[in-house]
Amino acid sequence: RMEGFGYYELPTGTEYRGSLWDGMFHGPGQLLFPGGGGYRALWVRGVPTQGKFTFADGLEYEEEKWHYCDGYDRRFYTEICSGFKPPGIPQLTNLDPPKIIPEGCYDCGDGFYDPKTRVVVNYKRKFLRNADNDEHEWILRTCRKAWDITTEDKPKP
């Protein structure tokens, strides 16, 4: 079995980098996700005992005092780091400029969703999953669509 320091890629594209013992994650190690986020932890026989999740944009998840997007402060993380854009220039997603959504599709956070085929692909157009009925309804109800037009408040002359 694998022992020592190594790299291990899971079928999902997630990669583990760190210490291994008896074929298990053991000691300091990190999971790197295909979307860019990561989870750094201290592992004991394959189970994380203490760890920290970091999103692709650098935002670190705090289990106790989580103040990001909490109802009082609705800014994107990039707005917290870089400040607001001038009035009249919207920021639609945390990624600025946002991804261009293919015609007829929705941006569901980890990729694009085509409601005709009910398939989610990542931003490089690689297959991720088939959407079940609940996810399909959620995406249609909440996600940004290719044909969305933002309306700006136009100042009076």
Image: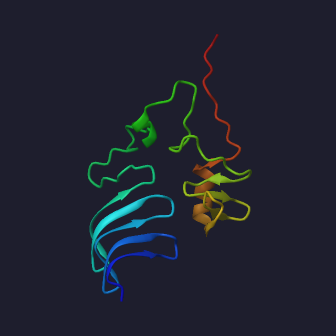
> Residue 21: which quarter of the image?
bottom left
**Horizontal side, residue 120 vs residue 44: left or right:** right
Seen at 33% across and 63% down, the residue is: 40
Give the answer, above or below, for where 76 lies relative to 153.
Answer: below
Coloring scheme used: rainbow
The percent coordinates of residue 138 (x first, y second) are 58, 56
Is residue 76 in sight in this rendering?
no
Residue placed most toward the observer, 115 or 19: 19
Give the answer, above or below, for where 21 lies relative to 80.
Answer: below
Give the answer, above or below, for where 59 lies relative to 28.
Answer: above
The percent coordinates of residue 76 (x first, y second) are 45, 41
Q: Residue furthest top?
A: 157
Seen at 57% across and 29% down, the residue is: 89
The percent coordinates of residue 122 (x first, y second) are 60, 60
Seen at 58% across and 62% down, the residue is: 135
How many numbered marks appear? 0
Give the answer, above or below, for where 140 lies relative to 14.
Answer: above
Is residue 13 in sight in this rendering?
yes
**Horizontal side, residue 77 vs residue 111: left or right:** left
The quarter in which the N terminus is drawn is bottom left
The percent coordinates of residue 60 (x first, y second) are 35, 52
The quarter in which the C terminus is drawn is top right
Residue placed most toward the observer, 90 or 19: 19
Q: Residue furthest front?
A: 5
